[in-house]
Image: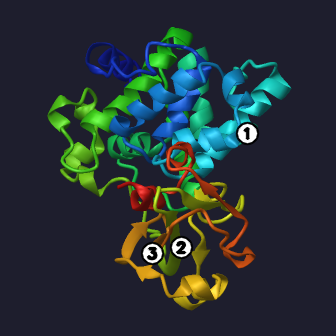
Amino acid sequence: MNFGTTVVAWQKKHGRHDLPWQNTQDPYAVWLSEVMLQQTQVSTVREYFARFMARFPTVADLAAAHQDEVLGLWSGLGYYSRARNMHRAAQEVVALHGGVFPRSSETLQTLPGIGRSTAAAVASLCFGEPIAILDGNVKRVLTRYLGFKQDLASSRVEKELWAIAQTMLPQRDVTQAMPRYTQGVMDLGATICTPKKPQCGQCPVANACVAKREGQPESYPVKTRKLKRTSEQLWLLQAQTVKGDVWLMQRPQIGVWAGLYCLPVFESFEALQAALPAKYRVQLQEAAVFKHVLTHKDLHLHPVQLTLPIAAKLGAAVGDGQWVLQADWPALGLPAPVRKLLTP
């Protein structure tokens, strides 16, 4: 049997079948799960997926929601651009496609936030389109199996791997086989062909795997370009009343924590002090500095606490914010470090 046929047979017997977004060909549910699973563990996504499906059971429900509610449900999952694009994509499905997801990967890619691999996953899993996916797990499986030593940091090389992946699909009963193949190659990467200590003895394609024959599976995939990390110091004004109400402002729609509700952010302690009326400056309490890690940057956050007896005016220089009741702020979309600060 060829690679595709072998993966289909393996998935039927040994693949994952109990994930909440499996055993359905509803493109909305599959798309939602694919977006959530980008750079996020399955164990984390389960809870968020259940909450989203309960609150927004259809794409029309998601499209009709306010962005603040969407970000609130997403809060803690990270990479918030996924949520904003997901909301916009839902609105386009309703406005441009009558509330029905396009069936082809090519058309799916025209929606906000849906790249080539996500579009292929939805089209193959839901509609049986013979189209290859190439997420992180699949790149690892294919480069090891093929002994593909070229550097995936090059877009030209990645295009070559896409072309090869397309030749490895099942060739018989394609419409029926594709959903199981796509799920199977993802399952292999997630459960067998793992980044460290792959379980080659349980792999259905091990006999033909170049990396296993070489004895160096962990050397694949090859990707030499490293992200250049930067760091930044930020001061956060944590103004709260004795009742627990907190002063929050909505971040701009671009940049760090775009669109989320956040404590006022300053580039220095002096700038924070200068933004407050003089009577409040003497009450400021500096808390312990902590680090929050983003994809390309380390944020060193300096919380500065200000406790007030009532929800008093803080001054225009603090920003266009508002006092939010203690009972209300947990439902807002908040950056993870801010939620951590505010949670007792």
Q: Report the amino acid beneath label 2.
A: Leu
Question: Pointer 1: what residue?
Answer: 88
- Percent across and percent down for residue 129 are 61, 20
In the image, residue 125 sits, relative to residue 173, either above or below, namely below
**Which residue corresponds to the image point at 57% horizontal and 46% vertical from the top-left?**
332
> Mark 1 and mark 2: span between their CA atoms?
31 Å
As drawn, the residue found furthest toward the right would be 96
219 displayed left or right of 28: left
Look at the numbered disc 2 and give the secondary structure of its residue: strand
> Mark 1 and mark 3: span between their CA atoms?
31 Å
Task: Classify 10 Å Cα crowding around label 1: few (below 14), some (14-19), many (20 and above).
Answer: some
**Quarter of the rendering occupied by the N terminus:** top left
Sequence-wise, which precedes: disc 1 or disc 2? 1
Question: Pointer 3: what residue?
Answer: 301
Any part of residue 151 in sight: no
The mark found on residue 237 in the picture is: 2
- Percent across and percent down for residue 222 are 39, 59
- Percent across and percent down for residue 192 are 25, 35
Q: Nearer the viewer, mark 1 or mark 3?
A: 3
As drawn, the residue found furthest toward the bottom would be 270
As drawn, the residue found furthest toward the left would be 201
In the image, residue 203 sits, relative to residue 234, either above or below, namely above
In depth, the one of 312 and 338 nearer the eye is: 312
**Which residue corresponds to the image point at 66% horizontal and 62% vertical from the top-left?**
251
Q: Nearer the viewer, mark 1 or mark 2?
A: 2
Q: Report the amino acid beneath label 3.
A: Leu
Task: Classify 10 Å Cα crowding around label 3: few (below 14), some (14-19), many (20 and above).
Answer: many
228 displayed left or right of 137: right
Look at the numbered disc 1 and give the secondary structure of its residue: helix
Sequence-wise, which precedes: disc 3 or disc 2? 2
**Quarter of the rendering occupied by the C terminus:** bottom left
- Percent across and percent down for residue 210 are 29, 44
